[in-house]
Image (cartoon, grey):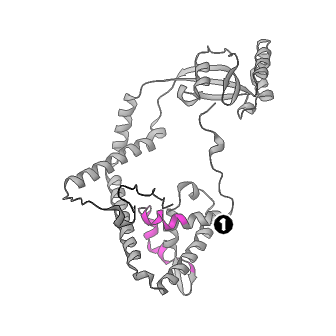
Amino acid sequence: MPRFSPWALGAPLRARRGLASLALGFCLVAGLLAPPAAAAADSTEAADVTVAVVNGTAIRGSELLLAYEALPEQYRGQPAGLLIGAIVEQLIDLKLMAALARERGLAEDPAVLARVVFFKEQLLRQSYLTALVEERVTDDLLHARFELLKERTPAHDEVRASHILLSSEADAQAVAEALQGGADFAALARERSIGPSGPKGGDLGYFTRDRMIPEFSDAAFALAVGEVSAPVQSEYGWHVIKLEDRRTAPPPSYEESVWSVRDILTQEVVTEAVRAAREGAVIERRDVDPGILGLGAAAGEAPPPAVSAQ
């Protein structure tokens, strides 16, 4: 059985309110820290589009685009109409709450101003590193690193297997005996298997040894092509496994690998930029009593766990 269950993947948001809440939270936090993702948000055309007016103050298209860009990638795949409407509603709330905050003098509050400075520096850091990565991680560099990684990646075996998952040893033994008597494996899987691959005749496709739980992998990789195993127990139940094919896995293509290669190079660029900046800086560190910062009242007391901004 696969190590990761498909049911662990979250379902798309179905309610406008839920999506709107996500938009607000992400725009207020990650949106302040994220680098500009597209030039569209800065264009004159986008800035001139009015999407709403709140007490005489216009909400421009450029603000909507900034909020949109702050959303996680998976939510940007939602229908544009739903996203735009939800984000506009949250921008309206944002304008209303910000106006009330100004009325209370919070725009000049030292704590607020300190946070503005902090968030601005984070935004500048992210913008600088984004520009640096775009300059240095070129197509030529991506291709060169891909070829190097491909040369260094050893070939590995894959098998293609089908299985019938049963809830008891007795049921698994009965299925094994039926197969020995000439029953069709795929038909029996569709009829008897309680696993999600049952409707596909038990077919699990190709996989490497590390993609499955050990009990399953050990049994599958020990079979000859066309051979059917005795019942095998795992945490999911009892399996009867048939080995369909065995092969040496083909190397991944450039298209399949480009994003992981880009991630590697991005991390290298960022790490080197930080290292070089530190090397050329004059840095003085001072001892700080956590109690002064409100992070621990007693000497030697551990600070409280960090709270996620999200």
Instruction: Please indicate whether residue 150 sits to the left or right of residue 207 in the image.
Output: left
Q: Nearer the viewer, residue 305 or 222?
A: 305
Residue 260 against residue 63 in the figure, above or below: above
- The amino acid type of the residue labelled 1 equals Arg
Residue 262 against residue 97 in the figure, above or below: above
Which quadrant of the view contains residue 189? top right
Q: Residue at x 53, y 61 (%)?
A: 71
Local crowd size for mark 1, using a 10 Å CA cut-off: few (<14), some (14–19), many (≥20)? few
Residue 253 against residue 238 in the figure, above or below: below
Residue extent of the magenta highlight? 25-52
Q: Residue at x 76, y 18 (%)?
A: 173
Furthest residue toward top: 181
Residue 279 against residue 90 in the figure, above or below: above
Where is residue 136? Give x, y as percent.
Answer: 31, 50
> What main secondary structure does the magenta stretch of the protein show?
helix
Where is residue 277? Give x, y as percent.
Answer: 24, 55
Tell how many labels. Answer: 1
What residue would you read off at disc 1?
17
Where is residue 138? Give x, y as percent.
Answer: 34, 48
Instruction: Please indicate whether residue 48 sits to the left or right of residue 295 in the image.
Output: right
Q: Residue at x 32, y 55 (%)?
A: 132
Q: Secondary structure at mark 1?
A: helix
Which quadrant of the view contains residue 234? top right
The magenta stretch spans residue 29:
yes
Instruction: Please indicate whether residue 21 sits to the left or right of residue 31 in the image.
Output: right
The magenta stretch spans residue 153:
no
Which quadrant of the view contains residue 245? top right
| Quadrant in which the N terminus is drawn | top right
